Amino acid sequence: MISILIPTYNYTCLTLVKTLQQQGEQLCQSEHMTNFRYEILVADDCSTQQNTIKNNLEINRIENCTYTLLPQNIGRAAIRNWLANQATYDYLLFIDSDAQVCSAHFLADYWNAVKPISSNTDRPETPAVVCGGLRNVSFCPGKKYALRFTYEADADKRRSASQRSKNPYAQFSTFNFLIARNIFCSIGFNEQCKHYGYEDVYFGMELKKKQISICHIDNPLIHLGIDTNLEFLNKTETALKTLHSLDDEIKEHVLIAHTAEQLRKIHLLVFCNRLFPVFRPLLRRNLLGPHPSLFLFKLYKLGFYAHIKE
């Protein structure tokens, strides 16, 4: 059956848990879902906002749901590994806490993707990993959110299951995926990734190494965590610092790191490094404004990565 695992930090996910619990109860009572069982485990990575903690503590009042506040911050990868160790059932459904369910049959679609072959003869084998996908919010909350909204809206064009399946490992995302527990325990998240960014790249790379197939389906969750322009730019810089600290093997699977290495080989990376401080204020002015350019955002990321690399 399914253990639903939700890592969180300074984010109230009570509504998300209630929606998932209601769907879980419906499946338990359905005559078509014999012996279906579920649990929802929320792990809080030592949040600092007391009101958020207070709201999330209500999760413990909901049947089959548990909220645990960790005594210290252990990082984005480690908290997911911790949740997996607490789980009871054979399948783990990882969901980020800033997600919103947008389908009344979200859990049913996941279960139908992995339930025993005998009850679904159209499928040649039971997949070990199923990715449901992500969807952007339908409208921009305001000008100060324009960068993240524009970035996510552009990414939505490539987020259908058919598009993701063209390059299944590179399109793996930790935001919303189901995995057999034994497969997850054989890999785990790379705990080098304590901060924002690239834990999904490492995990997708390990799945490819072990020749574990990924099934991409159209079962998305809406990403509600639209950061302000400044927050998203700061997160991007943090992610690039994380990337720089990771193994060279992982960097080979990330376009910006690959591009930087090619520039280094032809002696242009140092040139980018020298130009970046000059143009950085102009780039930031655009990216923090109401009409950010995604092309300039790419240049900013390359320049910033070249700067920390050199």
Image (cartoon, rainbow, N blue to C red):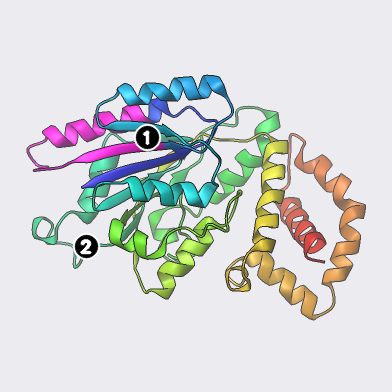
Give the residue drawn at x 57%, y 55%: 193
Crowd rating for badge 2 (residues with CA inside 10 Å; few <14, some 14–19, many 20+): some
Mark 1 vs mark 2: which is more N-terminal? 1
Give the residue drawn at x 43%, y 38%: 43
- The residue identified by callout 1 is 102
Q: Residue 282: percent from the left, percent from the top?
A: 87, 46
Q: Residue 52: percent from the left, percent from the top?
A: 51, 23
Write the start and end of the magenta stretch as one range: 17-42
| In magenta stretch: residue 30 | yes
Residue 186's image quarter? bottom left
Crowd rating for badge 1 (residues with CA inside 10 Å; few <14, some 14–19, many 20+): few
- The residue identified by callout 2 is 126
Horizontal side of residue 265 vs 1, given as left or right? right
Numbered label attached to residue 23? none
Amino acid type at mark 1: Cys
Q: Distance between the residues labelled 1 and 2?
A: 25 Å
